[in-house]
Image (cartoon, rainbow, N blue to C red):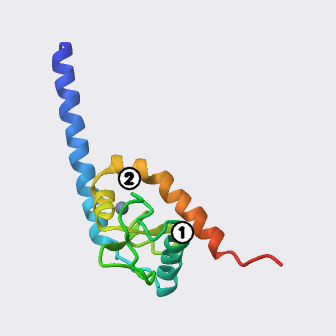
Amino acid sequence: MNDTEIMEVLYRLESKIDEGLAQIIERIDAIERRRHPSPKTKEELVQTVRDFYKYRCPCCELTQILNDRGTPKEVAQYDHWISKSRNKADQMWIVCRKCNSRLEVDSEFKNRSANRFKSFQERREQNAKPLLD
Ligand SMILES: [Zn+2]
């Protein structure tokens, strides 16, 4: 086999692996049960947006996701950061619809947003902690 032939074989192998992986992920998604956040978890996530993000999406920091009373608008969505079955407060955040759908399909965007998710969680934890005497 010459170099070109070897490259072709490698390329075919690679696309086979990608295809297989996509099927596995699809199966896992079908098996996993979506767990919605509890009312307490939702409130904790909303509170963090109220206190630290001026009612805006913590992912893009542009779209207003809470109304004037500080409750979620239509455009707000709870995003399962880890997987749809993980619904604890440290595994989720509340973002705008646009960010939520992008996080689902765009792994590059998700990687870039990881630091924002992390600092959202640090702020939430800081908020959830009782005040010291
Ligand atoms: Zn957003």
Figure quarter occupied by ligand 1 = bottom left
Residue 83 percent coordinates (x, y): 40, 66
Residue 44 percent coordinates (x, y): 53, 78
Say whether residue 88 is visible.
Answer: no
**Which amino acid, mark 1?**
Asp
Q: Earlier in the sequence, mark 2 or mark 1?
A: 1
Tag on residue 90?
Answer: 1
Q: Quadrant of residue 127?
A: bottom right
Q: Quadrant of the N terminus?
A: top left
- In the drawing, does residue 66 fall left or right of residue 128? left
The response on whether ligand 1 sits within 8 Å of label 2 is no
Name the residue rendered at 52%, 85% in the picture. 40
Name the residue rendered at 71%, 78% in the picture. 130
**Which amino acid, mark 2?**
Lys
Residue 34 percent coordinates (x, y): 35, 76
Residue at the right extreme? Answer: 133
- In the drawing, does residue 86 fall left or right of residue 22? right
Residue at the top extreme? Answer: 2
Q: Nearer the viewer, residue 58 or 23?
A: 58
Q: CA distance from mark 2 to mark 1?
A: 17 Å
The response on whether ligand 1 sits within 8 Å of label 1 is no
Q: Are marks 2 and 1 in contact (CB under 8 Å)?
A: no
Residue 131 percent coordinates (x, y): 75, 77
Q: Is residue 7 above or below residue 105?
A: above
Name the residue rendered at 17%, 17% in the picture. 4
Q: Is residue 115 above or below residue 92?
A: above
Q: Quadrant of residue 31?
A: bottom left
Name the residue rendered at 42%, 82% in the picture. 71
Q: Quadrant of the C terminus?
A: bottom right
Say whether residue 109 is visible.
Answer: yes
* Disc 2: which residue: 110
